[in-house]
Protein backbone atom coordinates (compact mmCIF):
# COMPACT_ATOMS: atom_id res chain seq x y z
CA UNK A 1 0.00 0.00 0.00
CA UNK A 2 1.09 3.57 -0.75
CA UNK A 3 -0.12 5.57 2.24
CA UNK A 4 -1.13 9.15 1.36
CA UNK A 5 -3.45 9.94 4.27
CA UNK A 6 -0.99 11.47 6.70
CA UNK A 7 -3.31 14.38 7.52
CA UNK A 8 -5.58 11.84 9.21
CA UNK A 9 -2.80 10.02 11.03
CA UNK A 10 0.82 9.21 10.31
CA UNK A 11 0.76 5.47 9.80
CA UNK A 12 4.53 4.94 9.91
CA UNK A 13 6.33 6.00 13.10
CA UNK A 14 10.01 6.34 13.95
CA UNK A 15 11.31 3.01 15.29
CA UNK A 16 12.19 4.69 18.60
CA UNK A 17 8.50 5.54 19.11
CA UNK A 18 7.49 1.90 18.79
CA UNK A 19 10.31 0.82 21.10
CA UNK A 20 9.28 3.39 23.70
CA UNK A 21 5.65 2.22 23.71
CA UNK A 22 6.67 -1.44 24.03
CA UNK A 23 9.08 -0.63 26.84
CA UNK A 24 6.40 1.34 28.67
CA UNK A 25 3.94 -1.54 28.31
CA UNK A 26 6.46 -3.75 30.06
CA UNK A 27 7.58 -1.33 32.75
CA UNK A 28 5.10 1.47 33.45
CA UNK A 29 2.73 1.58 36.42
CA UNK A 30 0.19 4.32 37.23
CA UNK A 31 1.81 7.73 37.46
CA UNK A 32 1.11 9.74 40.64
CA UNK A 33 -0.57 6.72 42.21
CA UNK A 34 2.31 5.10 44.08
CA UNK A 35 5.77 5.55 45.60
CA UNK A 36 7.33 2.36 44.26
CA UNK A 37 9.82 2.27 41.40
CA UNK A 38 7.57 1.61 38.41
CA UNK A 39 5.01 4.27 39.42
CA UNK A 40 7.73 6.83 40.05
CA UNK A 41 9.35 6.00 36.70
CA UNK A 42 6.01 6.66 34.97
CA UNK A 43 5.66 9.98 36.78
CA UNK A 44 9.16 11.03 35.76
CA UNK A 45 8.59 10.08 32.12
CA UNK A 46 5.35 12.06 31.97
CA UNK A 47 7.00 15.07 33.59
CA UNK A 48 9.94 14.93 31.18
CA UNK A 49 7.51 14.78 28.25
CA UNK A 50 5.74 17.87 29.61
CA UNK A 51 9.10 19.62 29.69
CA UNK A 52 9.81 18.67 26.09
CA UNK A 53 6.39 19.91 24.94
CA UNK A 54 6.74 23.15 26.92
CA UNK A 55 10.03 23.86 25.15
CA UNK A 56 8.61 22.69 21.81
CA UNK A 57 5.62 25.08 21.93
CA UNK A 58 6.88 27.89 24.17
CA UNK A 59 4.89 27.61 27.39
CA UNK A 60 5.40 26.65 31.05
CA UNK A 61 5.88 22.97 31.93
CA UNK A 62 3.04 22.88 34.48
CA UNK A 63 0.70 24.34 31.84
CA UNK A 64 1.04 21.32 29.54
CA UNK A 65 -1.98 19.05 29.93
CA UNK A 66 -2.36 15.56 28.46
CA UNK A 67 -5.70 14.51 26.98
CA UNK A 68 -6.90 11.65 24.77
CA UNK A 69 -6.75 13.61 21.48
CA UNK A 70 -7.04 17.10 19.99
CA UNK A 71 -10.83 16.83 20.07
CA UNK A 72 -10.80 16.48 23.84
CA UNK A 73 -8.26 19.29 24.14
CA UNK A 74 -10.49 21.61 22.10
CA UNK A 75 -13.59 20.61 24.05
CA UNK A 76 -11.83 21.32 27.34
CA UNK A 77 -10.69 24.74 26.13
CA UNK A 78 -13.89 25.84 24.41
CA UNK A 79 -16.32 24.55 27.02
CA UNK A 80 -14.11 25.66 29.87
CA UNK A 81 -13.53 29.28 28.86
CA UNK A 82 -16.84 30.61 27.58
CA UNK A 83 -20.36 31.15 28.87
CA UNK A 84 -23.61 32.96 28.16
CA UNK A 85 -23.14 36.47 26.78
CA UNK A 86 -19.80 35.79 25.10
CA UNK A 87 -19.10 36.30 21.41
CA UNK A 88 -16.54 34.11 19.60
CA UNK A 89 -14.97 34.53 16.16
CA UNK A 90 -13.91 31.46 14.20
CA UNK A 91 -13.42 30.54 10.52
CA UNK A 92 -14.88 28.47 7.71
CA UNK A 93 -11.79 26.25 7.80
CA UNK A 94 -12.64 24.64 11.11
CA UNK A 95 -12.90 20.94 11.82
CA UNK A 96 -15.94 19.64 13.69
CA UNK A 97 -13.70 19.34 16.75
CA UNK A 98 -13.98 23.12 16.92
CA UNK A 99 -17.38 23.62 15.29
CA UNK A 100 -19.48 21.22 17.34
CA UNK A 101 -18.32 22.53 20.74
CA UNK A 102 -18.99 26.06 19.47
CA UNK A 103 -22.42 25.13 18.17
CA UNK A 104 -23.23 23.47 21.49
CA UNK A 105 -22.36 26.67 23.34
CA UNK A 106 -24.49 28.62 20.89
CA UNK A 107 -27.42 26.23 21.30
CA UNK A 108 -27.28 25.63 25.05
CA UNK A 109 -25.83 28.87 26.45
CA UNK A 110 -26.63 31.47 23.83
CA UNK A 111 -23.00 32.19 22.96
CA UNK A 112 -22.76 34.30 19.80
CA UNK A 113 -20.69 33.10 16.84
CA UNK A 114 -19.28 34.69 13.71
CA UNK A 115 -17.08 33.08 11.06
CA UNK A 116 -14.43 34.45 8.74
CA UNK A 117 -15.75 33.33 5.36
CA UNK A 118 -13.93 31.32 2.68
CA UNK A 119 -14.34 31.68 -1.08
CA UNK A 120 -14.92 28.92 -3.66
CA UNK A 121 -11.22 28.03 -3.68
CA UNK A 122 -11.11 27.92 0.10
CA UNK A 123 -9.27 31.22 0.74
CA UNK A 124 -10.22 33.04 3.95
CA UNK A 125 -11.18 36.71 3.95
CA UNK A 126 -8.99 37.81 6.88
CA UNK A 127 -9.60 41.43 5.92
CA UNK A 128 -13.11 41.00 7.35
CA UNK A 129 -11.87 40.31 10.89
CA UNK A 130 -12.32 43.87 12.14
CA UNK A 131 -15.92 43.94 10.95
CA UNK A 132 -16.73 40.93 13.15
CA UNK A 133 -15.65 42.53 16.44
CA UNK A 134 -18.38 43.23 19.00
CA UNK A 135 -18.36 44.68 22.51
CA UNK A 136 -18.74 41.18 23.95
CA UNK A 137 -16.15 39.44 21.73
CA UNK A 138 -14.01 37.26 23.98
CA UNK A 139 -11.90 35.08 21.68
CA UNK A 140 -10.84 33.96 18.27
CA UNK A 141 -10.69 30.18 17.75
CA UNK A 142 -9.02 28.95 14.58
CA UNK A 143 -7.06 26.17 12.97
CA UNK A 144 -3.48 26.79 11.87
CA UNK A 145 -3.98 24.93 8.58
CA UNK A 146 -7.04 23.63 6.79
CA UNK A 147 -7.17 19.85 6.95
CA UNK A 148 -8.95 19.91 3.57
CA UNK A 149 -6.80 22.14 1.35
CA UNK A 150 -3.54 22.52 3.30
CA UNK A 151 -3.50 26.34 3.25
CA UNK A 152 -2.12 27.95 6.44
CA UNK A 153 -3.64 30.91 8.21
CA UNK A 154 -1.31 33.85 8.86
CA UNK A 155 -0.71 33.53 12.61
CA UNK A 156 0.89 36.99 12.74
CA UNK A 157 -2.37 38.52 11.51
CA UNK A 158 -4.44 36.57 14.04
CA UNK A 159 -1.98 37.35 16.83
CA UNK A 160 -2.00 41.11 16.18
CA UNK A 161 -5.80 41.09 15.91
CA UNK A 162 -6.21 39.21 19.19
CA UNK A 163 -3.73 41.45 21.03
CA UNK A 164 -5.29 44.65 19.65
CA UNK A 165 -8.72 43.67 20.99
CA UNK A 166 -7.67 41.84 24.15
CA UNK A 167 -9.00 38.51 22.93
CA UNK A 168 -8.15 34.97 23.89
CA UNK A 169 -6.42 33.19 21.00
CA UNK A 170 -7.17 29.46 20.81
CA UNK A 171 -5.26 27.56 18.14
CA UNK A 172 -6.03 24.14 16.70
CA UNK A 173 -2.55 23.01 15.67
CA UNK A 174 -3.57 19.46 14.74
CA UNK A 175 -2.37 19.81 11.15
CA UNK A 176 0.87 21.69 11.83
CA UNK A 177 2.30 20.50 15.15
CA UNK A 178 5.51 18.65 14.35
CA UNK A 179 5.81 20.18 10.88
CA UNK A 180 5.73 23.98 11.29
CA UNK A 181 7.29 25.66 14.36
CA UNK A 182 4.86 27.40 16.72
CA UNK A 183 5.87 29.53 19.72
CA UNK A 184 2.96 30.37 21.98
CA UNK A 185 4.73 33.13 23.87
CA UNK A 186 5.92 34.94 20.75
CA UNK A 187 2.49 34.75 19.09
CA UNK A 188 0.41 35.43 22.18
CA UNK A 189 -1.45 32.14 21.85
CA UNK A 190 -3.68 31.54 24.87
CA UNK A 191 -4.36 27.84 24.25
CA UNK A 192 -2.80 25.41 21.79
CA UNK A 193 -4.42 22.05 21.02
CA UNK A 194 -2.92 19.15 19.08
CA UNK A 195 -2.90 15.38 18.69
CA UNK A 196 0.18 13.21 19.09
CA UNK A 197 -0.62 10.91 16.17
CA UNK A 198 -0.34 13.26 13.19
CA UNK A 199 2.72 15.43 12.47
CA UNK A 200 4.10 14.82 15.95
CA UNK A 201 4.63 11.19 14.83
CA UNK A 202 3.45 9.77 18.14
CA UNK A 203 0.84 7.15 19.03
CA UNK A 204 -2.91 7.56 18.82
CA UNK A 205 -4.82 8.20 22.03
CA UNK A 206 -2.75 11.15 23.28
CA UNK A 207 -3.70 14.80 22.97
CA UNK A 208 -1.88 17.96 24.01
CA UNK A 209 -3.37 21.06 25.62
CA UNK A 210 -0.89 23.89 26.22
CA UNK A 211 -2.10 26.89 28.21
CA UNK A 212 -0.58 30.34 28.59
CA UNK A 213 -0.06 31.91 32.01
CA UNK A 214 -3.17 33.62 33.34
CA UNK A 215 -5.67 31.57 31.31
CA UNK A 216 -8.08 29.82 33.67
CA UNK A 217 -10.04 26.87 32.21
CA UNK A 218 -12.92 25.19 34.02
CA UNK A 219 -12.45 21.39 34.15
CA UNK A 220 -14.52 19.40 31.66
CA UNK A 221 -14.33 16.34 33.90
CA UNK A 222 -13.43 15.76 37.54
CA UNK A 223 -12.26 12.71 39.41
CA UNK A 224 -9.21 10.94 40.73
CA UNK A 225 -5.90 12.78 40.56
CA UNK A 226 -3.71 11.01 43.10
CA UNK A 227 -3.58 14.13 45.31
CA UNK A 228 -6.00 15.94 47.68
CA UNK A 229 -8.18 12.84 47.84
CA UNK A 230 -10.35 14.20 50.70
CA UNK A 231 -11.15 17.43 48.86
CA UNK A 232 -14.64 17.40 47.33
CA UNK A 233 -13.48 19.71 44.53
CA UNK A 234 -11.02 19.13 41.71
CA UNK A 235 -7.54 20.51 42.54
CA UNK A 236 -7.12 23.97 41.03
CA UNK A 237 -3.46 23.86 40.04
CA UNK A 238 -2.39 22.95 36.51
CA UNK A 239 -1.98 20.38 35.08
CA UNK A 240 -3.91 18.34 37.68
CA UNK A 241 -6.95 20.57 37.30
CA UNK A 242 -7.64 19.18 33.83
CA UNK A 243 -6.24 15.63 34.14
CA UNK A 244 -8.80 13.59 36.07
CA UNK A 245 -8.17 9.85 35.75
CA UNK A 246 -5.28 7.73 34.57
CA UNK A 247 -3.19 9.16 31.75
CA UNK A 248 -2.13 7.16 28.69
CA UNK A 249 1.38 6.65 29.98
CA UNK A 250 2.27 4.21 27.22
CA UNK A 251 1.23 6.68 24.53
CA UNK A 252 3.01 9.54 26.29
CA UNK A 253 6.19 7.44 26.30
CA UNK A 254 5.84 7.13 22.53
CA UNK A 255 5.25 10.86 22.18
CA UNK A 256 8.38 11.56 24.21
CA UNK A 257 10.45 9.50 21.77
CA UNK A 258 8.71 11.18 18.83
CA UNK A 259 9.64 14.62 20.15
CA UNK A 260 13.27 13.53 20.35
CA UNK A 261 13.10 12.39 16.74
CA UNK A 262 11.53 15.67 15.60
CA UNK A 263 14.11 17.76 17.44
CA UNK A 264 17.00 15.70 16.08
CA UNK A 265 15.69 15.70 12.51
CA UNK A 266 14.50 19.32 12.47
CA UNK A 267 11.05 20.62 11.58
CA UNK A 268 12.41 22.55 8.62
CA UNK A 269 13.91 19.35 7.20
CA UNK A 270 10.63 17.49 7.64
CA UNK A 271 8.51 20.28 6.17
CA UNK A 272 10.85 20.75 3.21
CA UNK A 273 10.73 17.03 2.38
CA UNK A 274 6.96 16.85 2.61
CA UNK A 275 6.45 19.99 0.54
CA UNK A 276 8.78 18.76 -2.21
CA UNK A 277 6.54 15.71 -2.53
CA UNK A 278 3.32 17.73 -2.48
CA UNK A 279 4.68 20.19 -5.06
CA UNK A 280 5.84 17.36 -7.32
CA UNK A 281 2.37 15.84 -7.10
CA UNK A 282 0.61 19.16 -7.73
CA UNK A 283 2.71 19.89 -10.82
CA UNK A 284 2.20 16.35 -12.07
CA UNK A 285 -1.60 16.42 -11.93
CA UNK A 286 -2.02 19.95 -13.34
CA UNK A 287 -1.66 18.39 -16.79
CA UNK A 288 -5.03 16.64 -16.42
CA UNK A 289 -7.75 19.02 -17.59
CA UNK A 290 -10.51 17.06 -15.87
CA UNK A 291 -8.94 17.46 -12.41
CA UNK A 292 -9.91 20.43 -10.24
CA UNK A 293 -7.44 21.28 -7.48
CA UNK A 294 -8.42 23.30 -4.41
CA UNK A 295 -6.37 25.68 -2.27
CA UNK A 296 -3.60 28.17 -2.97
CA UNK A 297 -0.50 26.22 -4.01
CA UNK A 298 1.51 29.36 -4.76
CA UNK A 299 2.18 29.91 -1.04
CA UNK A 300 5.34 28.48 0.49
CA UNK A 301 3.86 28.19 3.98
CA UNK A 302 1.32 25.41 3.73
CA UNK A 303 1.03 21.75 4.64
CA UNK A 304 1.66 18.87 2.25
CA UNK A 305 -2.00 18.43 1.36
CA UNK A 306 -3.56 18.41 -2.11
CA UNK A 307 -7.35 18.17 -2.42
CA UNK A 308 -8.93 17.50 -5.79
CA UNK A 309 -11.86 16.17 -7.75
CA UNK A 310 -11.96 14.27 -11.03
CA UNK A 311 -14.64 15.77 -13.25
CA UNK A 312 -18.04 15.37 -11.63
CA UNK A 313 -17.25 11.97 -10.13
CA UNK A 314 -18.05 11.34 -6.49
CA UNK A 315 -14.90 11.66 -4.38
CA UNK A 316 -15.53 8.38 -2.59
CA UNK A 317 -15.67 6.48 -5.88
CA UNK A 318 -12.36 7.98 -7.01
CA UNK A 319 -10.76 7.16 -3.66
CA UNK A 320 -12.07 3.58 -3.86
CA UNK A 321 -10.52 3.21 -7.32
CA UNK A 322 -7.21 4.50 -6.01
CA UNK A 323 -7.30 1.99 -3.18
CA UNK A 324 -8.69 -1.07 -4.91
CA UNK A 325 -6.98 -0.77 -8.29
CA UNK A 326 -3.70 0.97 -7.39
CA UNK A 327 -3.15 0.33 -3.68
CA UNK A 328 -3.10 4.05 -2.84
CA UNK A 329 -4.73 5.21 0.41
CA UNK A 330 -6.39 8.65 0.37
CA UNK A 331 -9.22 10.35 2.25
CA UNK A 332 -12.43 11.27 0.40
CA UNK A 333 -15.57 13.05 1.55
CA UNK A 334 -16.14 16.06 3.78
CA UNK A 335 -13.14 15.53 6.11
CA UNK A 336 -15.21 16.58 9.15
CA UNK A 337 -14.97 20.17 7.88
CA UNK A 338 -18.41 21.10 6.53
CA UNK A 339 -18.09 24.87 6.25
CA UNK A 340 -15.17 24.86 3.81
CA UNK A 341 -16.93 22.31 1.62
CA UNK A 342 -20.02 24.50 1.60
CA UNK A 343 -17.85 27.45 0.57
CA UNK A 344 -16.21 25.43 -2.22
CA UNK A 345 -19.60 23.98 -3.32
CA UNK A 346 -18.30 20.45 -2.78
CA UNK A 347 -20.71 19.36 -0.06
CA UNK A 348 -22.34 16.80 -2.38
CA UNK A 349 -19.26 15.63 -4.29
CA UNK A 350 -16.74 15.86 -1.48
CA UNK A 351 -13.05 15.94 -2.38
CA UNK A 352 -10.18 13.46 -2.56
CA UNK A 353 -7.38 14.46 -0.20
CA UNK A 354 -3.78 13.39 -0.77
CA UNK A 355 -1.52 14.16 2.21
CA UNK A 356 2.19 13.44 2.20
CA UNK A 357 4.42 12.61 5.15
CA UNK A 358 8.00 12.10 6.23
CA UNK A 359 8.01 8.45 5.21
CA UNK A 360 6.70 9.01 1.67
CA UNK A 361 8.99 9.02 -1.39
CA UNK A 362 9.05 10.45 -4.90
CA UNK A 363 8.15 6.96 -6.12
CA UNK A 364 4.92 7.19 -4.11
CA UNK A 365 4.16 10.55 -5.70
CA UNK A 366 4.82 9.36 -9.24
CA UNK A 367 2.67 6.28 -8.70
CA UNK A 368 -0.19 8.52 -7.55
CA UNK A 369 0.19 10.79 -10.58
CA UNK A 370 0.15 7.79 -12.94
CA UNK A 371 -2.89 6.35 -11.18
CA UNK A 372 -4.82 9.59 -11.53
CA UNK A 373 -3.86 9.71 -15.20
CA UNK A 374 -5.40 6.28 -15.77
CA UNK A 375 -8.47 7.15 -13.69
CA UNK A 376 -9.11 10.39 -15.56
CA UNK A 377 -8.81 8.62 -18.92
CA UNK A 378 -11.26 5.97 -17.73
CA UNK A 379 -13.80 8.18 -15.98
CA UNK A 380 -13.70 11.19 -18.27
CA UNK A 381 -13.35 9.56 -21.68
CA UNK A 382 -16.76 10.88 -22.70
CA UNK A 383 -15.81 14.39 -21.57
CA UNK A 384 -12.38 14.58 -23.26
Image (spheres, helix red, strand yellow):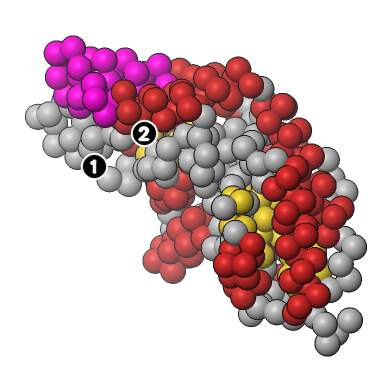
Classify 275 as above or below 237.
below
Q: Is disc 2 placed on a helix, strand or loop?
A: helix
Q: Is residue 36 visible?
A: yes
Q: Earlier in the sequence, mark 1 or mark 2?
A: 1
Which residue position holds label 2? 251
Magenta stretch, residue numbers = 24-50
Determine whether label 1 and label 2 are within 8 Å by CB: no
Q: Which residue is depicted at the point 12% across and 29% down?
A: 229
Q: Which residue is mark 1?
A: 222
In terms of depth relative to the viewer, which is nearer, 282 or 34?
282
Q: Residues within 10 Å of mark 1 (few under 14, many from 20)?
A: some
Give the mark count.
2
- Is the C terminus in the top left, top right, bottom left or bottom right quadrant? bottom right
Work out whether residue 135 can be spotted: no
State which quadrant residue 27 falls in: top left
Foreground label between 1 and 2: 2
Percent position of residue 198, x then y: 54, 42
Marks 1 and 2 sit apart, C-alpha to C-alpha, by: 22 Å
Residue sitting at x 43%, y 64%: 104
Q: Considering depth in this image, is 46 or 5 the residue closer to the camera?
A: 5
Instruction: Determine whether the residue tagged by mark 1 lies in a helix, strand or loop.
Output: loop
43 in magenta:
yes
Question: Residue lying furthest bottom in this view?
Answer: 382
Amino acid sequence: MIYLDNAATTLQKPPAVIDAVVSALHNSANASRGAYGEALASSRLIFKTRQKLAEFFGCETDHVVFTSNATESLNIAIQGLFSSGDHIISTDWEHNSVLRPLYRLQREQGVELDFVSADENGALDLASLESLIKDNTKAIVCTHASNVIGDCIDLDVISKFAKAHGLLFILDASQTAGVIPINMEELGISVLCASAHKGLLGPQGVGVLCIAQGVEIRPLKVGGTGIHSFDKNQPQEYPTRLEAGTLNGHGIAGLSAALDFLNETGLSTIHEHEMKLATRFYKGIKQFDSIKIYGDHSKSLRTAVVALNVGSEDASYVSDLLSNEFGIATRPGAHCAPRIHEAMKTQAQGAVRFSFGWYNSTEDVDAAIDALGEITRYLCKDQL
